[in-house]
Image (spheres, rainbow, N blue to C red):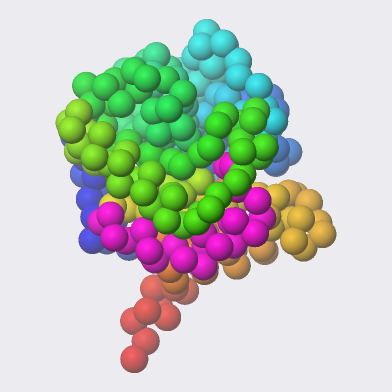
Amino acid sequence: MYSINCRGRLLSIKEPLVMGIINATPDSFYEGQLNYGVEGIVFLAGKMIADGADILDVGGLSTRPGSKPVSVEEETNRVIPAIKAIAGKYPEAILSVDTYNSIVAQKAVEAGAGIVNDISAGNLDKEMLATVARLQVPYICMHMKGTPETMQKEAVYEDLVNEVLDFFIEKIDACTRLGIKDIIIDPGFGFGKTTEHNFQLLKKLEIFSIVNKPLLAGLSRKSSIYKTLGTSAAEALNGTTVLNTIALLHGASILRVHDVKEAKEAITLYGAYKKAT
């Protein structure tokens, strides 16, 4: 069992948690999550909370393969009003900010976020780790090669699982040395990995338990699902549930998803399965 301290609020990971994805962007890869303004974002947050979300992850920058970065000012203008509005309407909600920019992370925590979710693990902003350490919030440290714009061109490994594991061992050490107390690891499905790589990681997910940190699986509606099935992101809910269930069986502590209700149901059934004698 793990627990993380989100700005004075202790979040227990006794059972797997669900993190709901809230995109404050105009260009999400999944059209069901396109940004409909702050009012629409608050409505979505309320629905996710009602469906059982434990964490809401708010991001203002598309990180789909080939996407280009936007300015810090633009990202801030997307994210901060959304976080303030959600925190104002649902003060009990635990919010995460999905950003690789330390300035955005700082402002987001000041606005009400209690977790920083960084796809680059500090590699795209050298001030990020020190900023998170100063803020004293949990840090989601994800593995990615290159940048969202270049990552799929860099999806080359000699030993995928061991390379990702070594990456986490080094990053956890760096985070700990700076004073980051709560670290969550994310193997980065789809970030600098081919479809085959993603299934290899999923099959060997239990290996990452060696670092003794909560493990986040972000598989929701990704191309590994819909390309394998020959469908689309809009039709990938069933496939997402299947892979989320496999991730739970292999040690995932947090499921990051677009569809909260279905993920909670998978966790409930997984719990019943685990208790069976």
In the image: residue 203, left or right of residue 141: right
Question: What segment carries the magenta color?
Answer: 191-212
In the image: residue 25, left or right of residue 48: right
The single residue placed furthest to the top in the displayed view is 73
Q: Residue at x 22, y 50 (%)?
A: 3
Q: Residue at x 38, y 39 (%)?
A: 141
Residue 14 is one of the magenta-drawn residues? no
Q: Is residue 75 above or below residue 201?
A: above
Front in this rendered view, residue 216 or 49: 216
How many circles with numbers are drawn on the protein? 0
In the image: residue 33, left or right of residue 159: right
Q: Is residue 144 above or below residue 233?
A: above
Would residue 231 be visible to someone looking at this image? yes
Quarter holding the N terminus is bottom left
Q: Residue at x 67, y 37 (%)?
A: 153
Q: What x and y, as percent, mark residue 82?
A: 50, 23
Q: What x and y, as percent, mark residue 180?
A: 22, 33
Front in this rendered view, residue 274 or 46: 274
Q: Residue at x 75, y 61 (%)?
A: 228
Q: Name the main secondary structure of what is drawn in magenta.
A: helix
Q: What x and y, as percent, mark residue 41?
A: 57, 30
Q: What x and y, as percent, mark residue 114?
A: 31, 32
Would residue 92 be visible to someone looking at this image? no
Residue 199 is one of the magenta-drawn residues? yes
Q: Is residue 103 above or below residue 245?
A: above
